Image (cartoon, rainbow, N blue to C red):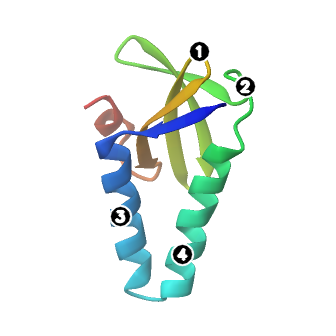
Amino acid sequence: MEKVIWSKRSLSSIRMIWNFYAEKDIGSANKVVEEIISTVENIKFGGQYQSEQISGIKYRRAVVRHFKIIYIVKGKKLEVLRVFDARQDPKKLGK
């Protein structure tokens, strides 16, 4: 992908993930966030990961540890919509 766009919601989730892990170990917090960012940056084509339907709309998802990265591809742009802890109730994902 030529460009990655992070939504405000996805950036907020990244900050919350970092804060959660940083309470125990800053190194671990950095590593988890780096894994998420690296996974997104290494998406080369739209169909690289699984598709998922949320509220009737088709998205793609990549999984890092227990986090779902929900994104859509528009031409050569990849937009990260959510970073979601998959251990939560999946019904929250549609909100």
Viewer-proximal residue among 5 and 28? 5
Query: Quick check: 45 left or right of 2?
Result: right
To which quarter of the image does residue 55 belong? top left
Kindly state the secondary structure of the residue where label 4 is placed. Answer: helix
In the picture of the structure, the residue carrying the numbered disc 2 is 45
Pick whichever of labels 1 and 2 is earlier in the sequence. Answer: 2
Say above or below: 57 vs 49. Answer: above
Q: Are marks 1 and 2 in contact (CB under 8 Å)?
A: no
Other-residue count near label 3 (Cα within 10 Å), few / some / many at <14 / 14–19 / ≥20 = few
Amino acid type of the residue tagged 1 in the rendering = Gly
Looking at the rendered image, the quarter that the C terminus falls into is top left
Residue at image coords 42%, 71%: 18
To which quarter of the image does residue 46 belong? top right
To which quarter of the image does residue 75 belong? top right
User: Is residue 61 visible in the rendered structure shown here?
Assistant: yes
Amino acid type of the residue tagged 3 in the rendering = Arg
Amino acid type of the residue tagged 4 in the rendering = Asn
In the picture of the structure, the residue carrying the numbered disc 4 is 30
Query: Quick check: 80 left or right of 91?
Result: right
In the picture of the structure, the residue carrying the numbered disc 3 is 15
**How far is disc 4 from disc 3 in space, using C-alphas?**
11 Å
Pick whichever of labels 1 and 4 is earlier in the sequence. Answer: 4
Looking at the rendered image, the quarter that the N terminus falls into is top right
Say above or below: 55 vs 17. Answer: above
**3 vs 1, front mark:** 1
Residue at image coords 48%, 88%: 25
Kindly state the secondary structure of the residue where label 3 is placed. Answer: helix
Residue 16 x, y percent position in the rendering = 33, 64
Pick whichever of labels 2 and 4 is earlier in the sequence. Answer: 4
In the picture of the structure, the residue carrying the numbered disc 1 is 75
